[in-house]
Image (cartoon, rainbow, N blue to C red):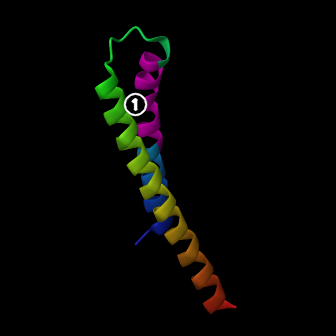
Amino acid sequence: MDYLQKAKDALALIKRGREALGGIMDAVKDGKAGIDADTIGEIDGLLEQERIENRETNAAITDAIADFRARQG
């Protein structure tokens, strides 16, 4: 299994997600999209959950790499 390619693929998906959110960010910033407060609140909640999951995933990957290195040393 090519783990490096899997990591690259995963990061490419994350990048595309950030790009997709860029349009939402612009609409919210300029206020022209007619987004109501409830929708803003829901988007904010979704993003907070994603931040939590990203931190947990990044920490787990970092820990796995550290464990691997410790076993190799």
Q: Which quarter of the picture shows residue 38?
A: top left
What residue sits 44% from the left and 46% below the top? Answer: 14
Q: Is residue 36 left or right of residue 2?
A: left
Residue 54 percent location from the top left of the image: 47, 55
Numbered disc 1: secondary structure:
helix
Secondary structure mainly formed by the magenta segment? helix
Taking the view exactly as shown, the residue that stands out farthest to the front is 37
Region in magenta:
15-28
What residue sits 61% from the left and 91% below the top? Answer: 71
Query: In the image shown, does 7 or 55 lie closer to the viewer?
Result: 55
What residue sits 40% from the left and 36% below the top? Answer: 44
Taking the view exactly as shown, the residue that stands out farthest to the top is 32
Residue 42 percent location from the top left of the image: 31, 35
Q: Amino acid type of disc 1?
A: Ala
Disc 1: CA contacts within 10 A as few (<14), some (14-19) or many (>=20):
few
Note whether 72 is above or below 60 in the view shown: below
Query: In the image shown, does 14 or 42 lie closer to the viewer?
Result: 42
Q: Is residue 73 left or right of residue 24?
A: right
What residue sits 40% from the left and 72% below the top? Answer: 1
Q: Which quarter of the picture shows residue 65?
A: bottom right
Residue that badge 1 annotates:
20
Q: Is residue 16 left or right of residue 68?
A: left
- Is residue 17 within the magenta segment? yes
- Is residue 26 within the magenta segment? yes
Residue 6 percent location from the top left of the image: 43, 61
